[in-house]
Amino acid sequence: MEKLKVAIIGCGGIANGKHMPALKKVEEVEMVAFCDIIEERAVKAAKEFGTENAKVYTDFNEMLKNEKLDVVHVCTPNNMHAPATVAALEADCHVMCEKPMAKNVEQAKQMLEAQKRTGKKLTIGYQNRFTPEQQYLHEACGNGDLGEIYYAEAEAIRRRAVPTWGVFIDEEAQGGGPLIDIGTHALDMTLWHMNNYKVKSVKGSVYKKLSDQTRTANAWGDWDTEKYTAEDSAFGFVTMEDGATIIVKSSWAINLADPREAVCVLAGTKAGADCHDGLRINSVKYGRQIIEKVDTKAGGVAFYDGESMNASDLEARQWIDAILNDTDPCVLPEQAFVVTQILEAIYESAKTGKTIEF
């Protein structure tokens, strides 16, 4: 079978850390074109991950015009997600866009409309769905083990881990800070497990309290206080149409001693779950409160845990399978759109002081 021809738009950190290494392991695809505004990055990516005759571009429109492609991965800053995705869809390509879906709701809507107009597949890179813990928890939720899930917490708290490279701290380029960067992962997982995408209202608080500090003990060194225009923490109170409540917590820098990133807490009528110490399910059995810790390791020996594919590899595998078999990808664009709606509502609520009604 002829291999699917894949192109990468944006050859920076997330492309090198996730997308390209994962695609390299999928035998049904070949990466034939690489685009980045910094040409050296695209050249390096082409040499490391591309075919022998892989092409390099600095303009994705030129690449889409010149190359016959099947699939495009968009790995740019958030403000370019929509332009690159829409252009690729209209060039008759299936698209995986890195999270979040877009910088704002208007741009995400453009992507959703382009997908429906072209009939091509579109998915968003929420790879945390593919960890063993989240796969197990999702199956448990789908089977009704937790009952009706009416309360949840979506947590993405870093104590001091502000990304100091690229444009992460640039609010204009990214649309926000930790909320749109890592809070989006936790919120996506939470909504997915609850299978609840009908939002009633959102109230939000956003803080920029620590960004002007120095000698910060930040994981990647002190940030540039002049360039740090995004928030350092943000929180949301989300009410769903059926009355369920979701608390969203996110930070890059905050004085909390117990950080947890990209995890969720669920409370249902039959049981609850959290990822605070691995995956734990709490319930009542035989008149006693119990907590069951799920062993997600498949192996039985000290040097092998049985996991042959990581979350990024599984994400790439299911995405290509969806294209080859003409099935839905795990992450539907309509789901990612609701995530973007909630994120924007938290920012808007914090700005206006009002509750945003859907």
Image (cartoon, grey):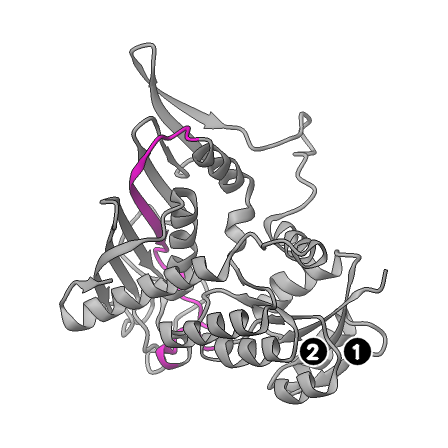
155 magenta-colored:
yes
Sequence-earlier tag: 2 or 1: 2
Q: Is residue 83 above or below residue 353?
A: below
Disc 2 crowd, CA 10 A, few/some/many (<14, 14-19, 20+): many
Disc 1 crowd, CA 10 A, few/some/many (<14, 14-19, 20+): some
Q: Which residues are magenta?
A: 144-172
Viewer-proximal residue among 149 and 92: 92
Identify the residue at image location x=38%, y=49%: 191
The N terminus appears in which quarter of the rendering? bottom right
**How many numbered callouts?**
2
In the image, what residue type sits under mark 1? Ala
Q: Is residue 227 above or below residue 95?
A: below
Are circles 2 and 1 on residues that touch, CB within 8 Å? yes
Disc 1 target residue: 54
Picture quarter containing residue 71?
A: bottom right
Could you say where residue 97 lies in the image, as x and y percent from the top left?
Answer: 55, 68
238 magenta-colored:
no
Viewer-proximal residue among 93 and 25: 93
**Left-right relation of 204 to 10:** left
**Mark 1: which secondary structure?**
loop
Q: Which disc number belongs to residue 34?
A: 2
**Left-right relation of 237 to 170:** left
**Mark 2: which secondary structure?**
strand
Viewer-proximal residue among 11 and 340: 340
Residue 166 visible somewhere in the drawing: no
